[in-house]
Image: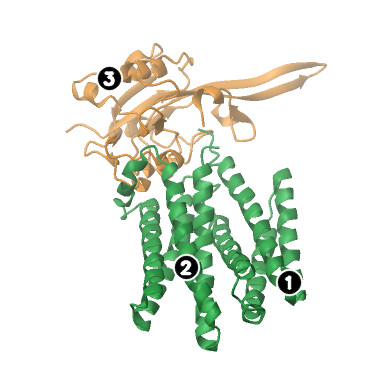
Amino acid sequence: MKERSLLAFTLLAQLAVGAFVTVGALGLWAGITEGEPTVLLFVDGALLWVALAMALAMLASAFHLGAPASALRAVRNLRTSWLSREVLLMVSFTVLVGLLSILRRSGAGSSALLAGVAAAAGTCGLGLVYAMARVYRIRTVPRWDTVRTTASFFVTMLLLGPLAVAAGLALGPDLTQAAARAPLLAIALVAAGGFSAEIALGGRGVLHTVRGAILFAGLVLCALSLLAAGRSGAFLAAAFAAALAAQGIGRYQFYVVGPGRPL
Amino acid sequence: MPGPWAFLFDAAACSGCKACQAACKDRHGLAVGVLWRRVYEVAGGSWARERDAWVPDVFAFNLSIGCNHCEAPICVEVCPTGAMRRRPDGLVVVDADTCIGCRYCAWACPYGTPQFDDASGRMTKCTFCADDVDAGRAPACVAACPMRALDFGERAALEARHGLDASFFPLPDPSLTRPGLSIVPHRDVGRAGPRTAAVANREEVGG
């Protein structure tokens, strides 16, 4: 498959945006509840991971190019090309997340500045996922030009991002079980919705059946995490692995089938 | 300034000799695997019962397709660098120095026109042999056709004579990009459809 690098890019970027949104919500929740400094420390660390994931995503996207050294030229046609818009949003999101991380760690910015940068980054991130979907919604490619493409990209964001954060919370050394309980509960509910949506989108073929089984396993793991409060982090970390495998297979099918035109 | 230009293809006259394809490769020194003009062999049909006998009931025709230098070129619209552009005379060209080889134009073009060159890492495409046309000569593919199945002319003139709305299988809906392509249809185009016909030489033409 020629699009291996695009598979890695789209999954990583959607994971990063989903994780950023989740971390943002986590930060807000910690701020409101005013008593969980460990959660705020976790947010600082998670922001670095988001920036790293985006850096890797950008690197992966460049591997797809015939002339990667000239990659920055890709922003020259913002007027009509969704690919140009995607690249601009990708770079903006990465820079803003990096800046937010630096500001938080150095304590240099006011809370209003931090909130502004975070809001701008979130807007760019969500815009990035939308632009990524629009890149494939080409009017000459009926197979890709459906709402299913947009839905799939946003569901991937909602599955991989929050579950990656849950895995981080489960593996994080300094977080108390009590501090993590509410975020893990919320993530389990969001992820269960994501798994259900992907199952409902359906599909045909052996590979889809395998993927369906993995999605169902992910849904069961989310349910288990809701039932077993003490081990919910471990269940959600396993659900993350299931989501990654399922969305990896789904994206592979997306690219392998390709535009699928007769000429 | 003459133009915009368009191709005329007579599917009823084409024998599928691929002289156009070879002449194009020769004229532009194209690498192995790069085909600016491709001859698609469209075939279909099966066996039909005639009283007590089964007889072949098959059909086949050829389509010679290069770049149609569309009026609404989607390759230009999606190109992120502006390397793909439509000249004032209507010819759609790619600037190799600006192209970054993202292949987005290849995804978007419903005619399979932009071709990736592995050696340069850039997209390449049919130029309508602009130098030849400017000098009053025919494009290489047109000049090479022994059946006179390929011709070229100004878009308006070809549209008035033959129309620019050929949309039989496997051609895409022309309203998507408004191609500069007139086709005199083969008698069997009405039998061809996504379920009744296929491109028989896929390995050769790619896609």
The residue lying at 50 percent from left, 33 percent from top is A263
The residue lying at 52 percent from left, 82 percent from top is A37
Q: Is residue B90 visible?
A: yes
Looking at the picture, which amino acid does disc 2 mark?
A: Leu
Q: Secondary structure at mark 3?
A: loop
| Residue to which mark 1 is pinned | A231
| Residue to which mark 3 is pinned | B138
Callout in the foreground (3, 1):
1
Q: Chain of mark 2?
A: A
Q: Secondary structure at mark 1?
A: helix
Could you classify mark 3 by the number of other residues whose Cα lies within 10 Å: few (under 14), some (14-19), or many (20 or more)? Answer: some
In the picture provided, is B98 more to the left or to the right than B162? left
| Inter-mark Cα distance, 3 to 1 | 75 Å
In the picture provided, is B43 more to the left or to the right than A218? left
From the rendered image, report the letter of the chain displayed in green. A
Marks 3 and 1 in Cβ contact (< 8 Å): no
- Chain B representation colour: orange
Same chain shared by disc 1 and disc 2: yes
Q: Is B126 placed above or below A118 here?
A: above
Residue B34's quadrant in the figure? top left
Residue A47 marker: 2
Q: Nearer the viewer, residue B35 or B32?
A: B32
- Relative image position of residue B45 (x, y in whole percent): 66, 24
Q: Is B119 placed above or below A96 here?
A: above
The residue lying at 77 percent from left, 74 percent from top is A228
